[in-house]
Amino acid sequence: MQEAGKIKVAVIGGGPSGMMAAIAASEYGADVTLFEKNEKLGKKLYISGKGRCNITNNCSVRDFVLNVATNGKFLLGALNKFTPQDTVSFLENNGLAVKTERGNRVFPCSDKSSDVIKTLERVLRGFGVKILLNSEISDVVYKENAFLLTNITDIISFDRVIIATGGLSYSATGSTGDGYRFAGKLGHSVTALRPALCRIRCKDVDELEGLSLKNVAVSAVSADGKVVAREFGEMLFAKDAVSGPAVLTLSSRINTVCLSGGKLTIDLKPALDFDKLDARLIRDFSERMNRDFINSLGDLLPERLIKAVARQSGIPFSKKVNQITAVERRRLAESIKNLSFTLIGLDDIEYGIVTAGGVDVKQVNPATMESKLIGGLFFCGETLDVDAFTGGYNIQIALSTGYVAGKSAAAAN
């Protein structure tokens, strides 16, 4: 039963943005009901970071925005109101010990995402938020200054509604695009939805499946030879694609680009320019003068990469090292610096860690997360057209926008 004088707020979605929105709205005096279609809260959060949950990135807001792929400026207000440091303090003050690892990535000390979810749920219940599980909202109607929410059995009226339903990826966790449908029906524009932080599919990588590389530079090159984007770090080969941190970030940089006819290139020795690499090859070859070419690269490359590099160089595998010309050696260096695979495209949006695109932020007040078209309607998290690179940034965006939406929804007009 609603307490007299309290604003009645509905939060649709029990992911990180929805849980934080419900916490903030309740903390600031609203009567809050959280609707979650799944049997438990935080289902997608549970699998994040391979189950460890990279909660945030403990950097400055300025550095944070540099790692936002889409609409970083829109997020400045929310990030300043609920910073990464606020997230750390919030969790620690509510009994969850956290640690900061390489690259300012913050994880629970237990390395269990379930502990993050338990903490958020404990705070929700402490504030008296009504949590309705297995309660899918099928429709949202705005009528006579009220919002009518339809679930399986009822139509319920609320003063304010916060849509925090996530994106389209990992639909088994409940991210099925409901928020985009609600937003569209309520008159809002939804920008093109694209996969982000996903694998990049390539031809002829199956023989390398399972191979992991560190400290390489990975580039997407257009059909006309232009480098569209480049990332440095770790990568992993799969049967028909490449993955790993560098590739995931690269995918978010190129998901608006036509990849047809393009190449994915890997600089296996980014610390060496061509002259230094050539000098290294001359030295290695001088020690293996009588070997077959294919047996001369073991000190320079991982064994499983040798055939791919040698094949691309065009040097016959059985050619003796002492017969390799300077021109051939140059081609070999080119293969090492630009090992190339034909691009097929990005993985399906279902398999993106996050969804790029969403509710057009031009129609949302960045200071409050309130719709500019309908007062009392708020959006947060992945439902918005915002996304960031790997490193804890996307969960922090969810928490920051959720906090601002919740606090704003609780405020009287």
Image: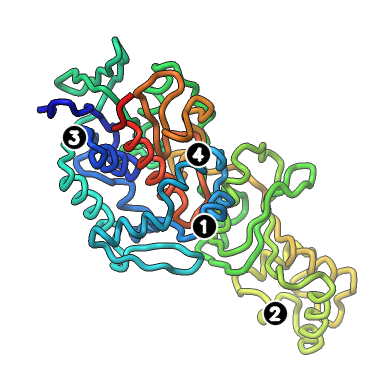
Q: Amino acid at mark 1?
A: Ser
Q: Which label sits in the foreground, 2 or 4?
A: 4
User: What is the C-alpha distance between the residues marked 2 and 4?
Assistant: 49 Å
User: What is the C-alpha distance between the residues marked 3 and 2?
Assistant: 61 Å
Provide the secondary structure element on which disc 1 rests. loop
Q: Are marks 3 and 4 in contact (CB under 8 Å)?
A: no
Q: Are marks 1 and 4 in contact (CB under 8 Å)?
A: no
Observer able to see residue 240: no
Q: Which label sits in the foreground, 3 or 4?
A: 4
Q: Find disc 4 in the rendering and name its residue.
A: 386
Q: Is residue 165 or residue 301 the one in the foreground?
A: 165
User: What is the C-alpha distance between the residues marked 2 and 1?
Assistant: 49 Å
Q: Find disc 3 in the rendering and name its residue.
A: 134
Which quarter of the picture shows residue 339?
Answer: bottom right
Which of the two labelled residues, at mark 3 and mark 4, occupies the earlier sequence position?
3
User: What is the C-alpha distance between the residues marked 1 and 4?
Assistant: 18 Å
- Residue 74 is situated, as x and y percent measured from the top left of the image, at 53, 38
Q: Find disc 1 in the rendering and name its residue.
A: 60
Which of the two labelled residues, at mark 3 and mark 2, occupies the earlier sequence position?
3
